[in-house]
Amino acid sequence: MAIPFIRNTLKRVFGSRPTIVLLNDCRDQANYGALALVDGLEAIITAAVPRARFVTIPSHWVIDAAFGFKAFWNNGSELRQPEALWPEVADQFEIVAEEWQAGRGGPGVAEYLERFKGADLVVLNGEGSLYRTNLSAIRELFLAWFAKTRLGLPTIFINGLVHLTQVTPTLPAMVDKTFSALDAVMVREPYSLRNLKEYLPHIPARVIPDSAYYLTADLQEASPAIKQMQAELAGADYFCYDPGAMPTDHRYGQRSGLQQLIKQLQSVVPNGVLVASSPFETNLEAIAAETGCRYLPHQSSYRHLMAVLAGASFQVTGRYHNPILGAIVGCPAVSLATTSHKNHGGCEILGGLIGAPYDGTDLRRQTPAIVARATEYYAERATLRPALQAKAASLRVQSMQMGQLVRSTLGQPATG
């Protein structure tokens, strides 16, 4: 433990750049939210620690590679994962750590350890991890615990969801073991804080909004495909639809729950744009053709999505970050629930401006309420849009606390 202290003291005295390991850098994923939150996170930290140097452990290093890399850029054709021994339950943390340090942890352990070499701080980016029995959750928790308890590196958890359950009770003990050792734990929305307090009330934690809130409306950028779509619409109102990861009823054409919903939404705003937030949402193009909507294939940046949402009357989405990007540009969201409580928490932190999520697997019964909310959004757009942007701006200020947390954990005085 003395070596990191001496190293950090020398760096402070001689002014060298602090090295920050970003654990779970998810910009390797072809996902708007994954790109947005890490760009925001790096910008927040850089604003607080201008000389910071980042070393990353990419998200594909900690996922279950057996399922492939289809959610990553270019279908993960150029990605690989270092081979290493991992714990399966909390009881195995110490033994696996001993194996790693004894050189028996597998051929890829050296690559993980190399990323920690010379580090001053480890930041575990909690995006997409701490729910169910995700291998990424288990591996990230172990790496953070290992960095803190075996390498003596200051380590914090930020930007994350915590959804612990009694259905698959593997994670609670791991979260307890890791979070109890860390220097700080920050979740991104109040639902996760309540869940953490329910299962592990002794863990000190608080809410700092998702780092994607640090982004600003001027970042929006219309791609050639979006410019063409805007020209075709010629200023007409439109709404956006993106189902997210949950299954929806679209199998039976005009008889399906989804097509019935879209038809009802078109009675509010005639033009619909079906947005592919990932490159493998291939069914949306056919649904767009069947419903008379426009189809927007997956774009290369969240900046393009922001440009689309900036002109939309409202969006219906099962994604977590699309309502955030929408709020930044003033587009309200009808949220659809997902496999964790993240979308409920995402709606809650927006202060009730967009209500609570609906069940996208039960659209036939939910459609009247969804359409009523969309109608309300459209009718109140003159006041709702600036209210959303003002709320996003206030959450942006709160998200900057991540930078102050990094400074304080590095032993630097607060700024501002």
Image: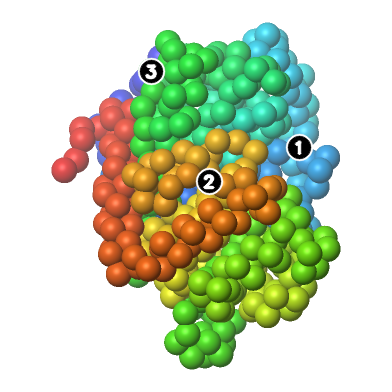
Q: Is residue 11 visible?
A: no
Amino acid type indicated by mark 1 = Asp
Q: Nearer the viewer, mark 1 or mark 2?
A: 2
SS category of the residue bearing label 2? loop
- Give the quadrant of the C terminus: top left
Most foreground residue, 370 or 60: 370
Residue 250 % position (x, y): 77, 60
**Would residue 42 be found to the left or right of residue 137 on screen?**
left
Amino acid type indicated by mark 3 = Pro
Residue 94 % position (x, y): 65, 10
* Residue 324 lies in quadrant: bottom left
- Give the quadrant of the N terminus: top left
Q: Are marks 1 and 2 in contact (CB under 8 Å)?
A: no
Q: Residue 357: which disc?
A: 2
Residue 105, placed above or below residue 46 = above
Q: Nearer the viewer, mark 3 or mark 2?
A: 2
Of all residues shown, which one is farthest toward the left?
Answer: 416
How far apart are the alpha carbons under marks 1 and 2?
Answer: 29 Å
Residue name at image x 41 percent, y 62 percent: 376
Residue where numbered disc 1 is placed: 64
Q: Residue 403: which disc?
A: none
